[in-house]
Image: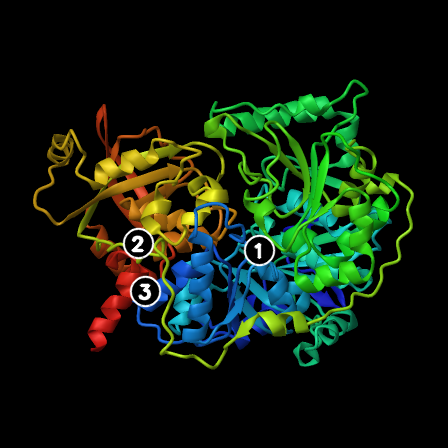
Amino acid sequence: MIKLYSDGAYIKGGQPVAADKKDIAAREKTIAYSILRAHDKGSGGGMMHIAFDAMVSHDITYVGIIQTARASGMTEFPLPYALTNCHNSLCAVGGTINQDDHAFGLSAAKKYGGIYVPANQAVIHQYAREALAGCGRMILGSDSHTRYGCYGTLGVGEGGGELAKQLLKNTWDIEDPEVVLVWLEGEVPHGIGPHDIAIALVGATFPDGFVKNRVLEFAGPGVKGLSMDFRIGIDVMTTETSCLTSIWETDETVEKFFNTVGRPEAYKKLELTEGAYYDRVVKIDLSQAEAMIALPFHPSRAFTVHELQADPERIFKETEEICNASLGGQVKMDLCRTINDKGQIVCDQGVIVGCSGGMYENIAEAAEILKGKSIGDGYFDMSVYPSSTPVERAMIHDGIAETLLDAGVVIKPAFCGPCFGAGDTPANNGFSIRHATRNFANREGSKPANGQIAAVALMDARSIAATAANGGILTAATDIDYDFTPKEFVYEGSIYEKRCYNGWGHPHPEEELRLGPNITDWPKMPEMKDGVLVRLTAVIRDEVTTTDELIPSGETSSYRSNPVALSEFALSRKAPDYVGNCKAVRDGLGDVPEELERVKGLLKISGDNLTVGSCVFSKKPGDGSAREQAASCQKVLGGFANICYEYATKRYRSNCINWGIIPFTIDRSEAFPYKVGDWVYIPDIKNGILEGRETFAAKVVDGEGVHDITLSCAGLNEEEREILTRGCLINYYAASLEKNR
């Protein structure tokens, strides 16, 4: 179904043709570069300096972003900025915290001239699709699934620091990216949905980083046969491939969408250009698609449903081994318990939700499969979350809601909870099948440190409905008989007009910000001194460390507006001693202050021009969410460096830089046998960073003595070097303000 081609290709006669050499100049003819260059405020030289058309944040991220920008001198929003409330919509956790943040968001939208979308009106990305996207535009979001490529919009998910930069009229700076052509051919078989294609794409590209930090450009004859909902169902999941962003060619289907949502001016045709060069090619034959399932703990653990049904015990045991190793012995996953005496897989829960699952067509087709049936009165349960109130209204108008309710399905409001561990948490060792974006550990809400574990597998809404109709027995939608003719989605935008505050371009500086008791300013961050001495406070040897492990999602995110309180949860599910270890270093090593003097003596360090902090080693950190808290919590606890083989995503590395954490790497061939409690010393680091040095001779102090190690910190631009040495982005902007007074 999917073939990968590492060699480049040109567009000739409307088709991709293999290239015999790299052609950077012809890359400028791609759709991606036509949009990037239109937003590039730089002057070339291999770097882009991007100014976006609009931004979006949700209620886990916008408070910190606005507080950062406010502390750095922002007086109004210089571009449309939508603040949605779809992550902490449930106010049962943390007392008044969530609603306090929502009140802050509305007051900020009024004060600075922003857009405020109340709780349960829409998930962040559906609002952006319906109200902000447009062909040729660029949108920056503080959520990793900021993907609007099929609407002709380059969407980028980044940490909060990058959004704060835009609010301060700065730019998003990247090296000129490579572009990968995703060529679609054939027609989708009956019973196949967008998640089936998306899971197959992630499974084919993520493990070897085939498209990492590259732009995906979708085109080909297969595009025309895909509905808008089908396209976005694939597009939003490109985040899980680790690509930089995505874009699609546009056609009358896209034009019809913008007409439907009342913004016809947002459409323009984007098409392939003769002679355009692509660095790599992914070919997908849609006609060969099969029903897919992604097993824990990553969307790339992709199998066909038939493959799993044929050999469930072997595949589940392999999955258990991988998952249990990553859980570090805290608890054991038991997937084999789901296999009944007939060799069938019995599921405990089905969920269709969020920016990937909660689309009108997914829900409508799932309802058709369940029409006249029942999910039963056993352990299996099922929830559906439409992605916006216009989608929910259409469900009611077209009888879809009635069909689902008659089958025993629970319909819930627009909410992202099940996607990040704050809703529909199954029972211990439960097996949940979800049309959602991720299935990382804890994304279903369980707590391994408390002896709890549950498993999420990603599936398309159609196969989830087929499973529900079959009493929870895992079933591919391609294996059942049903007819489906989608009704035309009727969009009612007046819902937003009545409930959403749109103050873009009309700030009211006299408006007072509403600050709840949990909303606090960032603590003062120290600047970097000449040398840096860091103690290893966590050493993680998993192949990949996700942002959900660096700072757990779920109910802990209720504290996201209080940096100090939130930092208490850092690495709590992966390295429970991490917070205490960091505090010991930050607070002078507690009962053993002489430890620091001993280490300084071994290293022959004299004087006080030394930054002492903490450091994390992990092989490949930062896969997953864009949440800046994964880095800011480390900084609040005294973190000053990370060491790894590579960073899983650009956004996490950017988060580290914006919070003054030096993003070191080491060569994979160089062993890292060191453990928690060992020290790493990097002399003359401040001057080295400012001078643009990319390798540093460092020393490690462990129980055996002093050892040499080479650390790398490559690819920093001038601004990033200044941010790091100042200690964080806030310090950098504060220094700029002081200089200009």
Q: Earlier in the sequence, mark 1 or mark 3?
A: 1
Question: In 3D space, how far apart are the residues under numbered discs 3 and 2 (Cα atoms)?
Answer: 14 Å
Dot 2 lies on which element? loop
Can you identify the residue that label 3 sits on?
A: 718
Q: Specify the amino acid type for callout 1.
A: His
Residue 271, position as x, y percentages in the image: 71, 72
Q: Amino acid at mark 3?
A: Glu
Q: Which residue is mark 1?
A: 145
Q: Residues within 10 Å of mark 3 (few under 14, many from 20)?
A: few
Nearer the observer, 526 or 714 = 526
Q: Position of residue 732 (x, y in %)?
A: 28, 64
Q: Quadrant of residue 701?
A: top left
Furthest toward the top, the residue is 341
Q: Position of residue 175 (x, y in %)?
A: 46, 63
Q: In the image, is 590 to the left or to the right of 614?
A: left
Residue 280 in the image: state x and y as whole percent: 63, 56
Label 1–label 3 contact, CB within 8 A: no
Q: Amino acid at mark 2?
A: Gly
**Along the line of sight, the residue nearer the viewer: 389 or 159:** 389
Location of residue 22 with respect to 707 vertically, above or below = below
> What residue is shown with label 2?
660
Front tag of 3 and 2: 2
Q: Nearer the viewer, mark 1 or mark 2?
A: 1
Q: Mark 1 or mark 2: name the one nearer the start of the chain.
A: 1
C-beta proximity under 8 Å, tags 3 and 2: no
Q: CA distance from mark 1 to mark 2?
A: 25 Å
Q: Nearer the viewer, residue 428 or 715?
A: 428
